[in-house]
Amino acid sequence: MLSNSRKRYLASASEAYAAQLAELRPGSDPNGAIRYLADHGVDFGIAAKYQLGYVAQAVPGDERFTGMLSIPYLTPAGVRGMKFRSLSSGGGKYAKHAGEKNRLYNAPAYFNAGTAIGLSEGEMDAIAASEHLAIPTLGVPGVEAWKEQWRLVFRDFSTVLIFGDGDQPGRDFAYEMAEIIGDRSRIVQCPDGEDVSSMVAGGRADELLAKMSTSKEDE
């Protein structure tokens, strides 16, 4: 259960970092945040919808996240978590506050989905599938973060489209999730070296839509 002070921090920090991202321009983007988002199919409009941000000036206590993207975990009740994504080539890709719990990303997808919902590994793929493939998609923040109780989230849907990255860990993730969810799952496998966001950014969304259609026809 989040404390009121934590909820206030998440709301204010998310708003501040989203504003800082909105202020970036190609000529004043030292860490390549705009380019990174574009490479994942995210423009300023989509970034604003998901309150994605950039830590140009950290709020007190967040100094170690300076220069990173902020990824708030939005819910109908407000922001309930936040991760940070490094834009540099060295070190770990993601960081978070001590004690931050793992959550499924893009909780609104659960409420916006009809009979079908998507499941991806990572936040950017969840955004790309939701916005460009018209399938509300939840994101698992890494295979190792999966919690057994999350399987209950998917029991109300007749179809769960599982997006697998085009590498061995991505294929393993897709098969593992399909095994957990059962016969309602349909794997949408990306080609080697690709994931949902890279395919969308590369103008190949139609290929994924065709795979999704084939998956549905195979039910």
Image (tube, rainbow, N blue to C red):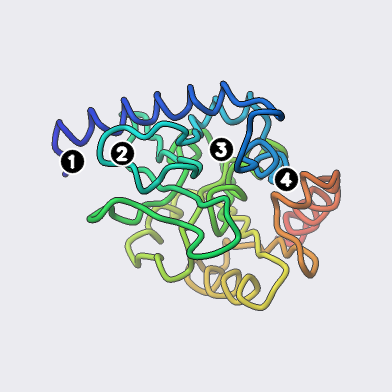
For marks 3 and 1, give the one nearer the viewer: 1
Of the residues under marks 1 and 4, which one precedes in the sequence?
Answer: 1
Q: Quadrant of the N terminus?
A: top left
Of the residues under marks 1 and 2, which one precedes in the sequence?
Answer: 1
Q: Quadrant of the C terminus?
A: bottom right
- Give percent across and percent down for residue 58: 37, 35
Label 4 sits on residue: 39
Alpha carbon separation for disc pair 3 and 2:
24 Å
Quick check: 122 above or below 201? below
Q: Nearer the viewer, residue 78 or 62?
A: 62
Q: Residues within 10 Å of mark 1 (few under 14, many from 20)?
A: few
Q: Residues within 10 Å of mark 2 (few under 14, many from 20)?
A: many
For marks 1 and 4, give the one nearer the viewer: 4
The disc placed on residue 66 is: none
- Secondary structure at badge 3 equals loop
- Give percent across and percent down for residue 18: 48, 27
Number of marks present in the image shown: 4
Of the residues under marks 3 and 2, which one precedes in the sequence?
Answer: 2
Residue under the image location 74 percent in, 52 percent down: 198
Please identify the quarter of the rendering in which residue 76 is found: top left
Left or right of 181 on screen, residue 42: right
- Secondary structure at badge 2 equals strand
Label 1 sits on residue: 2
Q: Amino acid at mark 3?
A: Gly
- Secondary structure at badge 4 equals loop
